[in-house]
Amino acid sequence: MKRMLRPKILSIVFIGAAAVAVGVGMAWALARPSGSATSQSGGPNVPDFSNIPLTPPFAIPTALATPLTDQQLSHEPPPGDLPTPSAAVRNAAIPNTRSVPDGWKVYDNPKFQYTFALPPDWQTDMKPEGGYFTIQNGAAVASTVTIQPGAADGHFVGMLKVALLGPVTDHLSQPNTSFGDYRGATWEGASDEDKAFGIANTIHFAFARGDLVFYGAVNLRQDGYSQTTVNTIYQIFSTITPY
C-alpha cells in the first residue's frame, strides 16, 4: 500500500479546538465576493495570462460527493453570514467568470458565492450546493495505487476570520492581489511536515469578505514537480470570481 499525501490547512487554529492533522488515506486530497477576480501579482514566476483566448464559460454537473466530515463542515461559512445574492447576480456569475482559457470548465460554488474554472483534466468533488471542496489534476486522479509523477491536489474552505491564526492572517495583512472588490494574497511554501510526506511546494490563496476568509491550498509532489503545474494553479486562482 502506498503512502498517500497528508492534507491539512496551513496553521489554521479554530477557537476552542486544537489543530487537527488529517490522516493519511487512499485519496490524497489537500487539496474572491462581488466583482471579477483580477490577479495583480500572483507569484514570483506567474506569467501574464491576459492574452490567452477565452471560451464562453459553461457550467457542468458536479460530481457526486461523499458526505463532509464534521471537520470539513467547520471549514464552511456559518449559515446567514453571506447575504443571499439576487437571481440576476447569480445568473450572471458563470458567464462573467474571468480569465477562462479555451477548454476549461467553469464551476459555481453557491455557498462560497464565487465561480472558478479548472482545466479539462482536473476534477472536483464540490457538492451542488457548494461549500468545502477539493480539486485534483489528472495525475492525482490516476493515483489510486501508486502516486503518479506530477500529481497535484488541493482544498478550498471558507471560515470566520476570528478563527484564523498564523501564516494565513499574516499574508492577508500584506495583500498582493485582488479577488473582485476584495484584496487578498497568493503565496508559496510547504511546511517541513508536508515535505516529509513528499510535497515539494504548496500554492496558497486567501481573501476576506467581511467576517469571512476564503482560503485554498494546492500541493505538488516532489516527483514530477514542474513550474508549468505551478503556473496552472495560479491561473486557476485567477479565475475565482466572487458574486
Image (tube, rainbow, N blue to C red):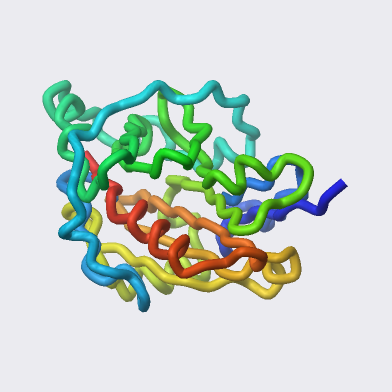
Which quadrant holds the C terminus? Answer: top left
**In the image, residue 85 lies at what x, y percent?**
20, 29
Residue at 69% in and 45% down: 143
Residue at 74% in and 64% down: 197
92 lies above or below 120 = above
**In the image, residue 225 lies at what x, y percent?**
57, 66
In the image, farthest residue toward the left: 88
Q: Nearer the viewer, residue 13 or 172?
A: 172
170 lies above or below 72 = below
Q: Nearer the viewer, residue 235 or 203?
A: 235
The image quarter in which residue 115 lies? top left
Seen in the image, is 115 located left or right of residue 10? left
Residue at 36% in and 33% down: 109
In the image, farthest residue toward the bottom: 44
**In the image, residue 127 lies at what x, y percent?**
47, 26
Seen in the image, is 211 located left or right of residue 87? right
Seen in the image, is 215 located left or right of residue 117? right
Residue at 17% in and 33% down: 95
